[in-house]
Amino acid sequence: MPLSKPAFLVPLAALFAAPVVAHAQPAGATPPAQIGIASFNLAWAGSQQDFDRHAAVCQAVSWCDTRPRREPGQASASEEAIRAARQCVADTERLAGGPALAAMMAPCNAYQGRNAGAPPTSADYAAKLAGLQATIDQLIEAQQVRVIAFQEVRSAEVVRQLLGRHAERFSVCDASHDGFQTVAFAWERSLSPEPATCSVERALAVSDKPGDPQARSVRPGLALELQWPGRRLSFLNVHLKSGCANIVPTPIYQARLLDDGAAACQVLNRQVAPLERWLDAVAKRSPDYVLLGDFNRRIDEEAAAAIRPQQVRADGSDPAGVPAADKDGKVATRYLWQELSDGARTLRQVPLTGVDPGCRGFSGLDHIVLSGPLAARQQADLGSRKSAVVQAPGQRIETSDHCPRSLTLSF
């Protein structure tokens, strides 16, 4: 299934500006009675050209892994594995043209999954892109989704390609970033009678290693605002730091709080204060907002746990308001959900009420959260659905390791 060419192109400089103002519906139009929204992690989605460059570099370095490998049963990687990973980083950066260009390329193991067979080919990647396009087509056609928050995508240009035949009636924006993965929105431009606005929340892009100018940063946030007469509706797209997901231990993942010493938890911890400040700033302009995306945290597990207010922060302080941060941005927060929905700020998680047969991949990481005022406006019981991605038999690169999660808002 070939990808359609983009129906229109916008200069990259315009995409990177913040805010971005998009086309609007004719003046005097009224908001729709319902809006279908979705969040979809595209699993390292770039263009076909991005993959071909990735494959050329990775073949030259024998598809090495830039992350130290741990053998089964090992608590940490061996010194030999660490040395091999460092050499892989150095070789990859040299062949890619330097650290900055290497950061804009997917790592060599991004598309191999658990399959240790032959390296993926250009045709394999084309099949992945075709699956993504077909999945997005189903969201728009079958579920009437009109706003889509994307994670793990290379650029707005890639989103336009994946919209295929729908590209002409959707606007797109992304968050410029110094890494391959970023976040983006696509929305049907007829939704808003006034120009829609996108703005990037760079405070969420905290450094992996504070004080190290060479360290990479995690993804920024992206806001989309749709304006009708007398009402503004905002969407906040996040892809938070991975590796600190659950408070309930599993055979694979140990339970971790946000004050855990693990490096991933330390990074996620430093995203808490910027996220809270962002929510408060948006709420002042737009009490009706949706926070959605890949949280990389089981906030559903946190919500189900009997966590008392004095347990939310390690110092026992009241979780209401933005927590105090040290010079590196670290806070006393231990539980993300209870910190965000702290009483002073009321949020409501949309429960997962349906999962399509054939939906595989990560669970509990992708969430849709409504502000209290917006949740109160809903005229029916809230529920969201996870849809299976489209994948051809024998497809070697999976379409995505996340299923899109969707919800219909009523007004």
Image: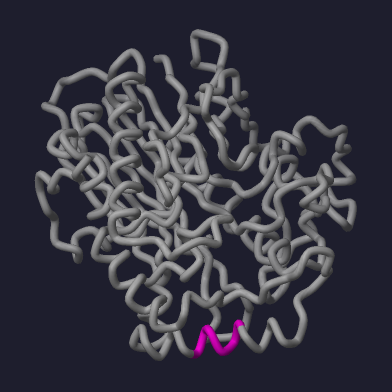
State the image quarter where residue 116 is shown.
bottom right
- On screen, residue 323 above or below 389: below
**Magenta stretch holds residue 83:** no
The structure residue drawn at horizontal position 40% and vertical position 36%, both measured from the top left corner, is: 393
Query: Bounds of the magenta span?
Result: 85-90
The structure residue drawn at horizontal position 62% and vertical position 32%, both measured from the top left corner, is: 347
Residue found at the far top of this picture: 380
Image position, residue 100 (x, y; %): 39, 82
User: Is residue 61 left or right of 333 when viewed as pictured?
Assistant: left
Image position, residue 214 (x, y; %): 52, 86
Image position, residue 205 (x, y; %): 51, 65
Specify the quadrant that holds the C terminus. top left
Report the front residue among 398 and 282: 398
User: Is residue 173 left or right of 38 when viewed as pictured?
Assistant: left
Report the front residue among 212 and 28: 212
Q: What scheme was used to colour the molecule? A: one colour
